[in-house]
Image (cartoon, rainbow, N blue to C red):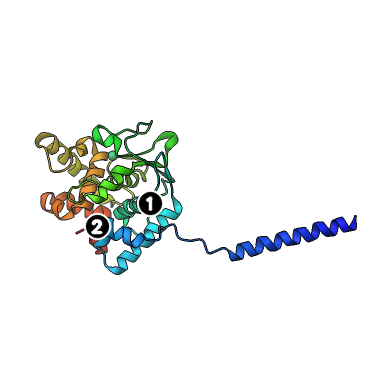
Amino acid sequence: MVVVFQIIMALLLILLIILISFRIGRPKRHTPLPENYKELLNDYVKFYRALDEENKEAFEKRAEQFLSGIKITGVQAEVEDLDKILIAAGAVIPVFAIPDWQYINLHEVLLYPGAFNTDFDQHGTDRSIAGMVGTGPLQNVMVITKWQLRQGFINNNDNRNTAIHEFVHLIDKMDGTTDGVPEIILERKYVAVWRKLMDETIVQMKAYGSDIDLYGATNTTEFFAVVSEYFFEQPELLQQQHPDLFTMLERIYKTQQSGVVVSV
Ligand SMILES: [Zn+2]
């Protein structure tokens, strides 16, 4: 009996030693950023390229924080390093000048290969296949298609970027209502001005057309997302074409105070 007990104890001790040495021998938890993240950011993210070294480092840190807290799941699509980097970039760009920002209303991003058809809050026209923010049981989930995600960053000559569009919806949603007024970051004194400017611009867009994507005229929620894409993709052009919108978006995203160059 004593012998059996001793054998059991010896075995347990060996197991303990194995477990301890395994833990010690394990490398430190490594970063969720892909190995070649600097290269990917430089090659694909214009916003990042335009930053100075100090801000580039800050951007990388924000991307890393984002990726360590959010699950990215491929749905019949492989999640490649580039997809991770571009999703993180889409998340970081709009809030880059806002310190300590966290997407507390997002837990998971689903990456689809192309068009999808689900119970998500569907957008009209061609936007329906681009991306969306889940509602109901799919709260805290974002869906984006790989193709649109990549197009948004590869094509720098338009004012479209699906990832930015979807993250702006999340920012808007943070105060409890998705209405185009991100009260969590917009100073109270500007709320009425912003509402009025959105309403007036939508009326003008419907009457005369616009260089702003007409999908933005759907409602103020879409207007805010669409015009934010324009702001981060082609800031100089927006400033030239729509100075009032540009000024308000600078106030919303704090890009003016922080001295961060929006894009080049
Ligand atoms: Zn939208």
Residue shown at the point (27%, 54%) measured from the top left: 253
Residue 261 point in image, percent of width and height: 23, 61
Residue 119 point in image, percent of width and height: 38, 30
Residue 157 point in image, percent of width and height: 17, 50
User: Which amino acid type corresponds to the residue marked 2 in the rendered image?
Assistant: Lys
Relative to 26, 179 lies left or right = left
Relative to 131, 26 lies left or right = right
Q: Which mark is residue 84?
A: 1
Say whether disc 1 or disc 2 marks the residue closer to the N-terminus. 2
Question: Can you identify the residue that label 2 sits on?
Answer: 46
Q: Which mark is residue 204?
A: none
Element carrying mark 2: helix
Q: Quadrant of ligand 1?
A: top left
Q: Quadrant of residue 13?
A: bottom right
Residue shown at the point (25%, 61%) measured from the top left: 49
User: Which amino acid type corresponds to the residue marked 1 in the rendered image?
Assistant: Lys
Residue shown at the point (90%, 54%) measured from the top left: 1
Residue closest to the far right: 1
How busy is the neighbourhood of tag 2: few (under 14 within 10 Å), some, or many (20 plus)?
some
Q: Is residue 100 visible?
A: no
Alpha carbons under labels 1 and 2: distance apart: 16 Å
